[in-house]
Amino acid sequence: MAMGAPEHGEQDNFWIPTANLAQSPGHPFYQRLNEIFRERGFDRFAEGLCRGYYAERLGRPSIPPGVYFRMLLVGYFEGLDSERGIAWRCADSLALRRFLGYGLDRETPDHSTVSRTRRLFSLETHQEVFTWVVKVLAQEDLVWGTTIGIDATTLEANAALRSIVRRDTGESYREFLEALAQASGIETPSREDLARLDRQRPKKGSNDDWTHPHDSDARITKMKDGRTHLAHKAEQAVDLDTGAVLAVTVQRADAGDTTTMYETLARTTAVLEEVAEDPETADCVDERILAEVVADKGYHSNQTLVDCEDMEMRTYVSEPDRGRRQWPGKEQEQGAVYANRRRIRGERGKRLLRKRGELLERPFAHYLDGGGMRRVHLRGGRNILKRLLIQVCGFNLGLVMRKLVGRGTPRGLAELSAAALAACVSALRELLLALKTFVGCVRAIEPVSCLPGRHETSRAYVPIPARPSRKRAL
């Protein structure tokens, strides 16, 4: 047997026919998603929307708009947190190459081109794509727009606390502590002296005094797990009848819920009005948009309830325990608070609050924790919102895919296929076992003739007698 030529002695082929290149049948999830894009004309819509960003004459190789948005969707479906990871995954996977429309003879876009395209496309362009996806949801009867739930969470910023500087002087945190130590009589303070001096200072992390030099939108705040970080605040509006996310905003992390909810409600109203004005989706949305608003106790305040009442929206906002309250000269606030209290104590109010706990926390878990956006790798509220809008588009498209194929993510569809294959194998195993039992029963009987004769007219089947024991009798 010959050993063959060593690997280091082989020479690569200079020419490779295209027909001999490796091909992939594609992932069934991404194939079905591409069919939705093709049926709804997504690429034509994206090219018309982004035509003004491309030069008439040939310049730097660019990404088609449809490919750019598909790559960001891959980041959600594959749980990739960075654009560098998205570019590497798309270049490595044959199934994703097929989803993007790239063969092995073409290089997929690198992360710098994706980043450049994101900075080039405006925030309004990303919001138009988000609205297009909401219209797809409406055509699938997944947008009602009557009962809206609002909730917010924090996103850890791509900025470290040790890099903050003073807003007035621009000096770093360490330089500020050294100046304080020298003013207190310590000429050459050590790290321990600075740490001890820092512990003794009250309210040392005020956002009015400190900022980050590279991300001015980030704010010092306490995260959900109790840690203190620079962060951003993401707020969403969810249709409580279907679970679809109708709007998402990124705002200051130190702003209260009663302050940020107005921008989210305004954005939700704009999206629903645009869906209602489209002839293809006008009949898919309820005429009473934003008739009810459901939120947790962080959104409860007198002014918030009065404003919602003026906008003809019924509120179902959990009320914190404030003890016995006095209402001198606040008849309008008292009426709004008591009406909200009466509604949340009713059966419908309790049902909506239970649904809020289910349908408002689930999107955060999907597109932040599972989608890799809990800690952002971008800086600036507008940049983060661009990526977050397409991230939420992936979640909404997952609702459409769940309705059509039963699962909303590629991994979920793979698990469904594995479960179906396991069920088929189990059914086949039971069938073989039943067949084996039947064959055993047939072999246990022997056909014999009932009467000897020339012409045998009938047969009787008698069981085979038991085999005598071979043991010798004593």
Image: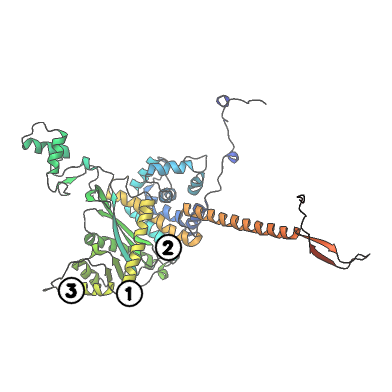
Q: Position of residue 330 (x, y in %)?
A: 14, 73
The residue type indicated by label 2 comes to Leu
Label 1 close to label 3 by CB (< 8 Å): no
Helix, strand or loop at mark 2: helix
Q: Nearer the viewer, mark 2 or mark 1?
A: 1
Q: Vertically, is 331 above or below 374? A: below
The residue type indicated by label 1 comes to Glu
Q: Which mark is residue 137?
A: 2
In which quadrant of the rendered view does residue 210 lie? top left
Q: Position of residue 133 (x, y in %)?
A: 41, 59
The quadrant of the rendering that contains the N terminus is top right
Crowd rating for badge 2 (residues with CA inside 10 Å; few <14, some 14–19, many 20+): many
In which quadrant of the rendered view does residue 172 lie? top left
Residue underneath mark 1: 347
Q: Residue at x 47, y 54 (%)?
A: 412
| Cα distance between the residues tagged 1 and 3 | 22 Å
Q: Which mark is residue 334?
A: 3
Q: Vertically, is 111 above or below 45? A: above
Q: Position of residue 200 (x, y in %)?
A: 12, 44
The residue type indicated by label 3 comes to Gln
